[in-house]
Structures are given as structure tokens and as C-alpha cells.
Image (spheres, rainbow, N blue to C red):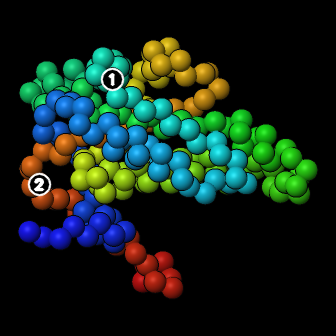
Amino acid sequence: MEEKTNNFSSLVKKRIVVREFKEPRTGKFDLDIKEIASNGIKIPTAGFSRGIEILTILNQDNINKIAVISNEKKFTTKGLDPWVSWSEGVIIILINKNAYIERYSKEDKNSSLNIDNWHIPYWYIDAGAALMNILLGAEDKELGSGFLGGHNIDINSLRLEFNIPKEIEVLGIVPIGVRKNIDKKKTTEKKKLIHTEIYGK
């Protein structure tokens, strides 16, 4: 039996976007998903603002509601297996922009660049870091995961259903489940993404 070596390098190499789960929710991985969620927010945040929050959904009825809100039926009517509704759990990544505004209004930060002039708002950078922690955390538990952005979701319905305040921004959702054993070779065109010293080199 091959020894499990889930160090950082092996996790990064194994991680893929998974949109097909083996079976509907079993409930056997609730503790794993709670741990993944907990580790998801163990990230550096600008000014230690701690403005990234996570909502974990494990109840099957609530998972089914998210499947409806994310228009899963559009894909199942084409013959594809359910994705969100077959997940063991769904992690919703949330951004509390006001936490950053409040933090950068403090006296020790008044010499910092005004957040309105940030080239890229750090709350999105921090949310991306949380997303990566979650995806790698799922891989560490030998579960599959993928990301569904907010533009594919009825955000207003999601807010109403799960009592998400209006001032909290939804980055998207991460369905996590038992990966279907399908070996799909990537056919995307190879692009140069790593450059040395000079762009293009």
C-alpha cells in the first residue's frame, strides 16, 4: 500500500477542480469539512482585519436549496450528474469589507494608503487565500472540491435563505464531496506561465 504523503508539494500537484462526485451525501465527512472550514480562515489578512468569514452548510435540505439557487437543474437536464446537491458539504466564502474599513481607520493605520486607492482591494486577495486553503484542505482529506463564483448564483436568494447581511459580500461557494473516479486528461493548450528575470523569458 502506497504511503500517504500529503505534504504541500504533493497536495498542490494532486489538486484539481472536481465537479463530479461519486454519490449523494453520506454525512461521514462532517468533521472533516468543519476542519477544512476552520483552516480556511487561517490566513494573513491586511492589517489583521480578519474580514474573511465562512458559512458551512452540512444539512442536506440546505445543500439542496443551494443547488436550486445555483441553477443545478440547468446541468442535470443535460444528463450530467448533480454536483452541488451530491456534495458532502458546501462552504460559502464571505467578505466583510467593513472590517477592513474599520481597521484602516485606526490611529496606527492613518498613514497607510487610503483603501479607496488600493490597486486591488486586499479583501479579495485575502478571500482568494482562504479559497486556496479550502481547496487544499479538501485534497488533504482526500475529498474533491471546486469553486462556483457568485456570478453563477442567485445571490439575493442565497442571502435571504441563509440570513447573510446585505453588507457582507459573497465570493462564491465550494462544494466538497467524494471524488468520482474518472481520469480525465487535460486538453488545454500549454501556456508559458512561469517567467524568470524578464517577462517572457
Residue depicted at 34% across the width and 29% down the height: 58
Which label's residue is closer to the chain start, 2 or 1? 1
Q: How many labels does the image show?
A: 2
Classify mark 2: residues with Cα within 10 Å, few (<14), some (14-19) or many (20+).
few
Between marks 2 and 1, how big is the CA–CA gap? Answer: 30 Å
Quadrant for the C terminus, please. Answer: bottom left
Residue depicted at 48% across the width and 32% down the height: 55
Q: Type of residue at label 2?
A: Lys
Q: Horizontal placement of 148 versus 144: left or right?
A: right
Q: Please name which of the two marks, 2 or 1, marks the residue nearer to the observer.
A: 1
Q: Name the residue under label 1.
A: 59
* Most foreground residue, 143 or 68: 143
Residue depicted at 28% across the width and 52% down the height: 141
Q: Name the residue under label 2.
A: 184
Q: Mark number for residue 92?
A: none
On the image, the x and y values in percent for residue 176 come to 29, 40
Q: Horizontal placement of 186 versus 176: left or right?
A: left
On the image, the x and y values in percent for residue 123 come to 62, 46
Query: Can residue 156 be seen at all in this image of the molecule?
Result: no
Relative to 2, does residue 117 appear above or below in the rendering?
above
On the image, the x and y values in percent for residue 170 come to 51, 32
Mark 2 element type: loop
On the image, the x and y values in percent for residue 151 come to 43, 31
* Most foreground residue, 54 or 198: 54
Q: Type of residue at label 1?
A: Asn
Mark 1 element type: loop
Classify mark 1: residues with Cα within 10 Å, few (<14), some (14-19) or many (20+).
some
Relative to 175, does residue 1 appear above or below in the rendering?
below
Query: Can residue 157 be seen at all in this image of the molecule?
Result: yes
